Image (cartoon, helix red, strand yellow):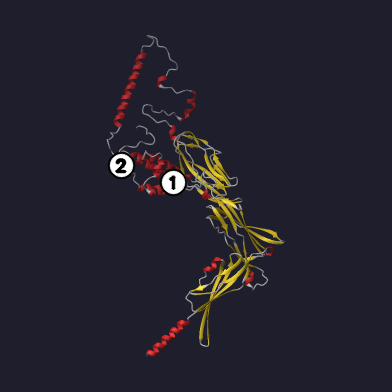
Amino acid sequence: MVRRFLLTTLLLLLYVGNSWAEISASVSRNQLSINDSLVLEVVIAGDHDGDPDLSPLEKDFEIRSRSQSSQIQIVNGDMSRSTKWSLSLLPRRSGALTIPSICSGQDCSQPITVTVMPQSEQDQENADVLLEVESQPAERSIVQAQILYTVRLLLRQPVSQASLTPPEPQGVETLVQKLGDDQHSETYRNGWRYQVIERHYALFPQQSGKLHLPPLQFEAVLQGSRNPFDVQNRVIRQRSAALDMQITPPASTEHPWLPALGMRLEDDWQQNPPTLTVGEPATRTITLRGAGVTAAQLPEIAMAIPQGLKSYPDQPSREDVAGPTGLSGVLVQKVAVVPTHAGRFELPPISLYWWDVEQACWREETVPAISITVLPAERQTVAPLTAQTPPVVPPADATAGAQKEPAKTPATETSAPTPVHQGADPLWPWATAFCAMGWLITLLLWGKSSKKKRPVEPSASPSLPALPINTGKHQVLDAARQHDARKTYEALCRWGEQLDSSKKNGAEYWLRIDNNVLREEVTHLQRCLYASDGEAWQGDALLQALTDWIPVNTEKSTTPLPDFYPRRPS
């Protein structure tokens, strides 16, 4: 038994000692062009722990495809197995390149040297595919300024399964944006006719330093090859040249940095300034267009508003537009202007500084100042009514006659003053005294009746402000039920001033209210009212929000709030 155990142990040790793995590597060719590829085969014979490490190949070669296969052989009772990896490698540069050792565990293959030749001018002249790149400017640019990068692909024969790598700038952080669709044309090179495909990119470096644009790679399958069964000959590859550029820092920090090819500032009120009305909002639109900049680079427009006007700017809209000069950014700023007083107002000019990339200097784009007229509100044109001088409304058919004959008053019943002689008319003094007594009695009776009708005001009663607050609420609810956005907004402003007189504007009360649902509905109402697309507004959501909300003023206020307009005494 002991002998059998020792024999088994010895056989196991011999088996473990004879366990081995051998790695070998070979290439399909040792000399190739920069646009050609080679096949690397890595074979591991025997047992191995795992796949070989292929990462060292990435330094000088691009692995385009890979495959794996296993084989087991039994000869005279001896079993052997092997695993093969086939890799298609495309060189990244020309010169003498080394395929490093490929290792699996402790076992490694021998390195292999291959020679990669650059494409000759003769090969370029006879090539079926040409890939060209250029940049504008060519050698030097400035931070955040636009660089036009043009890729030109020339095809002499039809191709399929084509692929072109996008530009991947290195060295400095760069924003890359494709400009529009590809452009197609034809040209002749060295007597050959080529189909031309142009692709344009806008590059915006965000840092100073050296910008490196690596070569682009094009790969396709030629259609109509002489030997359609030879797959290797049907695959064609082409590579562009690399470009390097120096990016300089901003030339000046006198103003916020905004490099561009051109800038234009537009105001829709310049040609025809509107006539506004107190309490009624009007939308002013400022448009900023910049050539050679993105819309994200354009700053928001700051507009100064004189006293007597209030402004409510919307979130600006931004858009990038591709054009002949590259990328152009467009910013549209809409501002709702609400007059609070009537009169003549001057809106100050709007200025913007930008850096002219072509002339290397600062420039100022300005919108001139404009004057606008604000008319009083329709209800403010009627003078407040008083009890001492009740108004007399003439009938409609008496309007024309009023212009020809002035209305007579009790104090001017005679057409001309007549001198009074002593003893001429003894009844006149008595008539005058009688009239004076009548007016005095009338005033006493009117004062007594008004005093009886006036309610006694308690020193502190929380129910007093209920009348104006409820009245304002009812006006808002009635307008919202009719889905009238403008009437609802005006009623909200008046009610907001009743609820909190410390706010500069009634709308400010609702935009700062501690009720998210109601605040969002008021914001939505403003957006529908001032939006240019004319979105239809429905007041159901605002109705529900106001129904569920209880004003804080009705619980804490002890002083009655005055009505927005004076009420006629009863």
Q: Earlier in the sequence, mark 1 or mark 2?
A: 1
In the image, residue 488 above or below residue 413: below
How many discs appear? 2
Residue topped by disc 2: 556
Q: Quadrant of the C terminus?
A: top left
Q: Element at badge 2?
A: helix
Q: Where's residue 484, x and y in %?
A: 44, 44
Q: Is residue 179 visible?
A: no
Quickly name the residue at label 1: 525
Left-right relation of 194 to 26: right
Q: Quadrant of residue 410?
A: top left
Residue pictured at 46% horizontal, 83% vertical: 15
Q: Which x, y percent locates residue 144?
A: 54, 50
Quadrant of the rendering where the N terminus is positioned: bottom left
Q: Residue furthest right?
A: 191
Q: Classify mark 1: helix, strand or loop.
A: helix
Tell me which amino acid carries mark 2. Lys
351, 332: nearer the viewer = 351
**Residue 364, quarter of picture:** top right
Q: Position of residue 408 (x, y in %)?
A: 43, 22
